[in-house]
Image: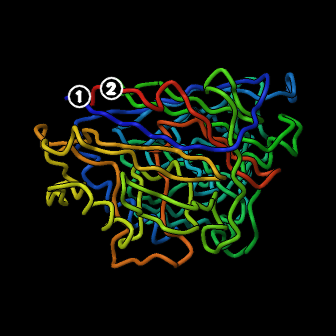
Amino acid sequence: MKSFVALSIILLATSGSSLNTIPLTKLQGNGVYLKGSPDAGRARAASLKRRADYGPTTFPATNVQYEIYTTKVGIGNPPTYYDLFVDTGSANTFCGAGKLYVRTNTSIPTDDTVNVTYGSGNFTGNEYLDQVTLAPNLVIVNQSIGDALSSAGFNFTDGILGLGPPDLTLGTLSPDNVTIPTVMNNLVSQGLVENQVLGIYFAPPKNNNDTNGALTYGGTDSSLYEGNLTWVPVTKTYPASYFWGVNVTLCTYGNHTVIPTSTAGIVDSGTTLVLFADDFFSVYMKAIPGANIDSNTGLLDIPPSSISRMQPLNFTLADRLFPADQNTALGGDPGKRYGTVGSFGNNSRSGEGLDFLLGLKFLERYYSAFDADGNRVGFAQTNHTFSTYEG
């Protein structure tokens, strides 16, 4: 079924240079896994050469079941490779949810346990310091790794590559109560990259296990986006400030104002949909004639009569407009069209410091960059920003 998605966002510009990029794979399935996506997103929102060329490095990522991207990460020496979920909304890295952790002579137990809850999933296990191979020229030593002895909610992945701010790790260890240096922290501290900048390129999937994404460590890959990056400062509003949070100054759908004034939310590759506080989402849904929540999938069901009249959902960030009119097939009844915008649920109201979430379906339309040095998030258009695709 043909789906039309146009995400348009306008951001201020700046860009990166030479780099190493790693491909990412996205798994696209029959929608069974996605059925829990609205609930998972709501739960998550609630909980929330050792220097090689000293430049950015880009690597692949794979899309999995419409919902997440994974990348291959080697742990130990010799390395065992795991498919880890690319997550900017958390900062702990762990494996063992699928393929078990294989200890080698580089695996050093810390005698700490680690416990992390992700809203729709969790893991508990032991912490190790180990060698982590992101690429032949990006090998981190003594990286904190969680060995998951028990886990839930990770059906299609071996664990998580935590790419969020390091403060998110505080409180996850016991008995120690310290912040854990993340993969990005250690890449810089060990001289593997110069800048603590992560570039992410996602794209709408065309088939199952589609390796159509890329991660760039240490900068951005200008071959993957158009024009310049628009940089948005990380918000000072708590709790969005705890994550990769940004302020949206206005959000409109057609002639309807969804977000009327500056409000804070987060950019999260670990959530599938674009989510709003319930009162914002209500404005959006009522503006689409005949739209309702599908009882089977929990997704926004958009009737055929409204598909051709869908308007852009426009986010204003850093004085730039990013349009995102989206309706796409995400599993469930093949005769229906499902929106990629949802609500937090739980009678959530705006004004609570985290009023929207820009998830994977937004990030598939824009290149994004996460700059810990500059405390900012960047966006740029790609060749998929206004493209149509078969869902």
Q: Secondary structure at mark 1?
A: strand
Q: Position of residue 234 (x, y in %)?
A: 70, 59
Question: For the point 63% across and 59% down, which residue is it?
Answer: 246
From the image, tell me which residue sits under label 1: 2
Q: Position of residue 310 (x, y in %)?
A: 28, 44
Q: Residues within 10 Å of mark 2 (few under 14, many from 20)?
A: some
Q: Residue furthest front?
A: 255
Residue type at tag 1: Lys
248 lies left or right of 206? right
* The one of 63 and 368 positioned closer to us in this rendering: 368
Q: Position of residue 75 (x, y in %)?
A: 65, 38
Task: Give the quadrant of residue 46.
Answer: bottom left
From the image, tell me which residue sits under label 2: 389
Question: For the point 33% across and 48% down, which residue is it?
Answer: 340
Q: Residues within 10 Å of mark 1 (few under 14, many from 20)?
A: few
Q: Position of residue 322 (x, y in %)?
A: 52, 45
Check whether the beta carbons of the residues at disc 1 and disc 2 lie within 8 A of each other.
yes
> Which quadrant holds the C terminus?
top left
Measured along the vertical axis of the image, is residue 223 above or below residue 239?
Answer: above
Type of colouring: rainbow
Q: CA distance from mark 1 to mark 2?
A: 6 Å
Residue type at tag 2: Tyr
